[in-house]
Every structure is written in structure tokens, then in C-alpha cells.
Amino acid sequence: MAKAKKNPKKHNKIHKAYDLSGGFKRKNKFCPKCGAGVFMAQHKNRATCGKCGYSEMANKGPAESKDKKK
């Protein structure tokens, strides 16, 4: 029987989680439930932890009317 091909392992891109220009700075925040070392993923309207599933919705600005008077 032929061996099944294994999918290549995807490496973590941890170098994208830090900003080294002008010092050491983390781009994403840590999960408040999991603690330091577990980053939260940034989506369009929320931040989510991939380990425990904790989510924070992004703050919306002041409500803007769709039908603006001219």
C-alpha cells in the first residue's frame, strides 16, 4: 500500500506579532483569560483568542446618519 503524502507543516509567523522599529513592541494584546504569552487575533470588528475563544468587540465611533442633509 502506498504511503499517504503528509501536508507540509505551517510555521508560526511570530515575527509578525512584534514591531522592532524604535524598540520592542507587541502589535496585538494578550488574552485577559489565558494570560501573558497568548495573543488575541485582530479581525475587522473584534479581537479573538484562539486558545479559549474569548472575544472583544471593537468600539464603534459616534453613530452616523446614513441620510445626511445637505
Image: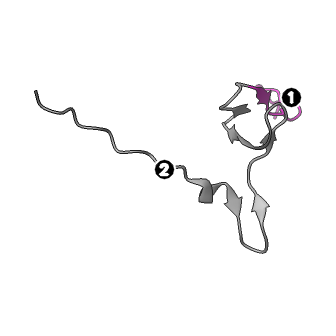
Residue 49 at x, y percent in the picture: 71, 32
Give the labeled residue for mark 2.
11
In the image, 64 versus 22, the foreground residue is 22
Q: Is residue 55 visible?
A: yes
Residue in the picture at 81% in, 35% down: 70
Q: Secondary structure at mark 2?
A: loop
Q: Which residues are magenta?
A: 54-70
Residue 20 x, y percent position in the rendering: 71, 69
Dot 2 or dot 1: first in sequence order is 2
Q: Is residue 70 left or right of residue 41?
A: right
The quarter in which the N terminus is drawn is top left
Q: Residue at x 78, y 62 (%)?
A: 25
Q: Is residue 1 above or below residue 61?
A: above
Where, by quadrant of the figure, is residue 40 drawn?
Answer: top right
Q: Is residue 43 magenta?
A: no
Q: Which residue is mark 1?
A: 63
Residue 45 visible from this viewpoint = no
| Residue depicted at x 17% and y 33% | 3
Q: Nearer the viewer, residue 61 or 11?
A: 11
Label 2 packing within 10 angstroms: few (<14), some (14-19), many (20+):
few
Amino acid, disc 1: Ala
Q: Position of residue 8 (x, y in %)?
A: 34, 45
Considering the numbered disc 1 on the image, is that residue within a helix, a strand or a loop?
Answer: loop
Query: Which of the pair 2/12 is nearer the observer?
Result: 2
Q: Is the residue marked by circle 1 packed among few (<14), some (14-19), or many (20+) residues within 10 Å?
A: few
